[in-house]
Amino acid sequence: MSDDLARLQAELGYTFKDTDLLRHALVHSSAAHKRLKSNERMEFLGDRVLGLVVAELLLNTFPDEDEGEIGYRFTALAQRDALAKVANDIGLADCLTLSNGEHLMGGRENPGVVADAMEAVIAAIYEDGGLEAARTMIHTHWTPIMRENLRPPKDPKTTLQEWAQGRGLGLPQYKILGRHGPDHQPIFSVEVTLSTFPPATGEGSNKRAAEQAAAEIMLATIDEAK
């Protein structure tokens, strides 16, 4: 076993019985000869395992909050930023298997790449040790993030919508302006318009992330205009 994998397992707090599962979880699509040999299918599974465990954790931790408040917390904990934070905390990027081109383009510093790999690692733990092993790891690394927010956080898109409706301005309107980048790592550009404010444009690795980025920029514009 390489020193990097041993260190990563120590950071995760989980020792694999089958380290090939962990190696597979760290293979980016750019380095796989066939797409199915990359970690993309494991990302899909890891996303679902994370969602289940985080939902369970939130319901048990905040028994007096309603579904809407829990939903805000869930979004904050299950999104890319939280995944990337945990990945960076455990030094996951140093263990990724990337193509030379992806490495030179800064793949190890790309939040989307490391967040996806973090999901794949969660799937690897689930496949190797079952749900309880995945639950233990997620509780260890996500609970501190959960505790950072004493009040249920709201994402920028929700915040903008509620602010606009509270002032009778109608709903913000989002429009996809374009998409660029490679197929395995696209970047979407989205514009949001609201009342008489100037349009704001944001980018993200998917449509939802781009909308959130645009909403955040619009909120900053609103704050400046106050």
Image (cartoon, rainbow, N blue to C red):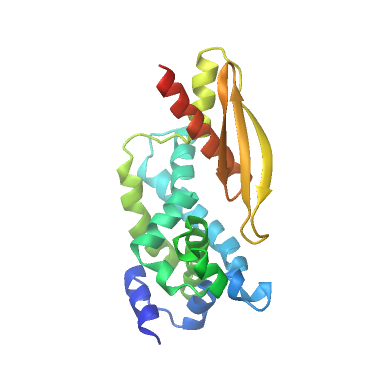
**How far from the left and from the top, in percent, is residue 120?**
52, 66
Residue 102 falls in which quadrant of the image? bottom right
Task: Work out whether 126 lies above or below 145.
Answer: below
Quarter residue 140 falls in: bottom left
Task: Please name the residue shown 43% across and 18% down the image.
Answer: 225
Q: Nearer the viewer, residue 154 or 57?
A: 154
- Residue pictured at 35% horizontal, 46% vertical: 146
Between 213 and 181, the residue placed more toward the observer is 181
Side of 10 relative to 171 (left or right): left
Q: Quadrant of the N terminus?
A: bottom left
The image shows residue 198 at horizontal and vertical percentages of 56, 23
Instruction: Give 88 or 47, whichever is nearer the viewer.
Output: 88
- Residue appearing at x 52%, y 56% in the figure: 112
Residue 210 drawn above or below residue 198: below
Residue 167 image position (x, y, % from top left): 51, 13
Considering only vertical position in the picture, is 19 above or below 30? below
Give percent across and percent down for residue 162. Answer: 51, 23
Query: Which residue appears at 34% of the width and 49% of the height?
Result: 145
Number of disc labels: 0
Q: Residue furthest top?
A: 168
Q: Residue furthest bottom?
A: 1
Residue 37 appears in the picture as rendered: yes
